[in-house]
Amino acid sequence: MELPNHAKQLLLQLNQQRAKGFLCDVIIVVENALFRAHKNILAASSIYFKSLVLHDNLINLDTEMVNPSVFRQVLDFIYTGKLLCSSEQSNEQNYSALLTAASYLQLHDLAALCRRKLKRSGSKPLPGKPSTLGLHGRVRHNNQRLSSSTPATSHNHYIPTPSDADQPQPDEGLRDKLSDDEMFIGSSAGKNGNLSSGGEPDLGLDLSKKSPPSIGTGMDALSPHSNSQESPQSASVSTTNSASLDDSTTTLPSLDTTGPEPMELTPTPRAPEDSQPKTNSPPPRKSTRQVARKKEWPKREASGLKAEDRERPLLNGVIMGPKEGRCSSGGYGSSFTSDQSFQCKEEEDEDGGENGHEPSEESGQSDGENRGKGRGGESGHQSANYVYRQQGFEPAFGDNLYVCIPCGKGFPSSEQLNAHVETHTEDELYIKEEVGAFVKEEEEEAEDLSAPVAPTTFGSSELRPFKCTVCSKSYKDPATLRQHEKSHWLTRPFPCNICGKMFTQRGTMTRHMRSHLGLKPFACEECGMRFTRQYRLTEHMRVHSGEKPYECQLCGGKFTQQRNLISHLRMHTSPS
DNA sequence: CTGGGGAGGGGGCCC
DNA sequence: TGGGCCCCCTCCCCA
C-alpha cells in the first residue's frame, strides 16, 4: 500500500510552511538577507547543513560562496527538488554560481545537476560570482577557515576543482530523477513580485554596517552558538550586492556589533572548553536547580526564535503576526480572536486557505502565547501607541495594514510607513492635547497600571531645565527631552524587520532584534549561561555569589533581584 | 493544588 | 547609541 503522491504532498506542505515561516527553526544569513527554514529539511539534504544545524540556530554563510539570490534558488531546490533559475543572470552564470554554492553546501545532487547543465552548454564550471579569488583559491581559503571552525563533519566538505568538475559524482541519482522538464527557467522575481532587480532590497539597514572587515560578522561573533568552533560560515559580509529576497527572506537591520568583543566583556572559559559546543552544554555544577535551569535555557532560545515567531506567517519578507496586535483587526489589545482572524486572512492571501489545518494549529499556539506574552497581552494599552491596522481604519485602507495614525494614511509595509513617518515633522506627530484626547485616556489607564515616576520626583527645574510640554516631566538635556517626547508620539519609528513590531527607540529595537537572532553576548564565567544584556548577567552573577542585596523591611527577607523584592512586597501589601 | 520564591526574558525609559 | 534600571510576564521549583 503506497500513497502515490505522499512525498510530493509532504514537500509541498513543507515548502508552504517555509514560505510562512511556520515551524521554521533556523535562520540562514546570507549577506544581509535572512532565510528561514527547517533544520530537518536542511539536515536531510546536506551533511554540511546537518552539521551546522546541529548546534546553531543562526547560520551565516560565506558570502563569497553564495549570495542571497543563489541561496534562494538553493533553498527552493531543497524544498521542491526543482531549480528555478533567475533570469537576472545568464543561465551559464547562474549554474556556475549554483554549482559553487552547491559544492560549498555539499548539495551533491544540485551540484551534479548544475555540472551537467554546464557541460551541456559547453562551458566549464566556474565560480558564478566574480571574485578576486579563483574558485580553487577561494575554496581553499574557505576551507582553511573551516579547518578551525567547522563541526566534526566538515572534513566531508566537498571541494570542487576544475578537474573534478567533469567527473561523475557518486550521488548523481537526482540527475536521473530530475527530468529537464523539472528545471524551470523563469524569472523568480516575477514569482514573488517583491524583488528588486539586482538592486539592494530596500527593506532595512545593512547588516554589514559596522561589521568587522573579515573574519565573520559581528553578529556571528555575538551569536551564542557561534564560537569559532561552531560557525564554519564565518561570512565576510560586505561588498556584494544582494539580489533578491524570497518570501521567507528578510533583511537585517543594523545591529551594532562592534565595540568590545563579548568575550572581552565577559570572558568565557577558553579552551579546552571552546573546543566543545559549550553553549549547549554548560558545565554541570551548583545546585540541581541550576542544572535544571541550564537544561532549560537552550530550549528556550532554540533557534533564536520564540515559538510564536516561528509560527507567524511571512509577508513580503517580514515575519508577520500580531503579537502586539499590530495587525489585528480587532482593535487595541485584541488577543486571541483577532490573531486568529489575522492569520486566517494571511492564509487566504497566500494560498487561498489551502491549508485549512494550519490556522487551527497556529491559533492553538497563539492561545498559549497570548496568555503569556508580556505587555502585548496585558491590556492593550501598551500597544495603543503602535501604528497598526485599526478597526475604524480598516475599510479605508484595504490591504494597507500599516496606518499612520496622525494623518490616517495606510501603507502596505512597515518600511513604507516608516518612510512616511519621516516626512512628518515632529510637531505634526506630536500629540497635542486637543488631538490626543483619546490617547490621553489610554495613557491614563496605562499610568494607573504602570505607576510611572511622577513629575515631582524629578529634581528642581534648575537641574532639569528642559520640560516636556505634554506631561511636564523635566530633563537635564534637550536630547533626553526629545527622546522622552517621542514617547508621546502615536507612531513608533523603529520597526523590527523580522516581526514588524514597532519601537520608540532604535536601541530598544536593536535589543529586540537580538532576541530574534539569538544573540547573547554576555556569558557567565561560572556556568556558561548567556544573556542578551549585561544587566541580566550582573543579576545572574548573584546566583553564584549568593549576594542578596535587596531586603524586605517588613520581614527581613532577602532577595537577589529587586523585582523579586517588589513582588514580595506586594505579597505583604495585597489583601490576601 | 496552591502560594511564594527564584530566575529568565521582554519592553520602556532615562542617562 | 548603548548601558542601566525599572516594570512586567512567565515558568519552574518547592514547601
Image: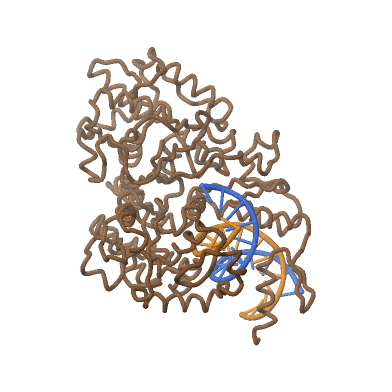
Chain colours: A brown, B orange, C blue
Tell me the residue at 21%/30% (across/down).
Answer: A180
Camera sees residue A1: no
Query: Which x, y percent locates residue A286?
Result: 76, 54
Q: Residue furthest front?
A: A462
Camera sees residue A423: yes
Query: Which x, y percent locates residue B14?
Result: 57, 62
Tell me the residue at 26%/16% (across/down).
Answer: A123
Instruction: Give the camera-side residue of A376 and A484.
Output: A484
Tell me the residue at 49%/66% (across/down).
Answer: A373
Instruction: Give the camera-side residue of A449 and A399.
Output: A449
Instruction: From the viewer's perspective, tell me whether residue A219 is left or right of residue A30.
Output: right
Query: Which x, y percent locates residue A347?
Result: 28, 59
Instruction: From the viewer's perspective, tell me whether residue A544 is left or right of residue A59.
Output: right
Examine the rendered structure and indicate whether residue A194 appears above or below residue A397.
above
Examine the rendered structure and indicate whether residue A275 appears above or below residue C3.
above
Instruction: From the viewer's perspective, tell me whether residue A515 is left or right of residue A101.
Output: right
Q: Residue furthest bottom?
A: A575
Query: Which x, y percent locates residue C10?
Result: 55, 67
The quarter of the displayed image where residue A387 is located: bottom left
The quarter of the displayed image where residue A107 is located: top left
The quarter of the displayed image where residue A465 is located: bottom right
Q: How many marks?
A: 0
Quarter in which the C terminus of chain A is drawn? bottom right
Q: Residue furthest top?
A: A163
Tell me the residue at 54%/52% (across/down).
Answer: A301
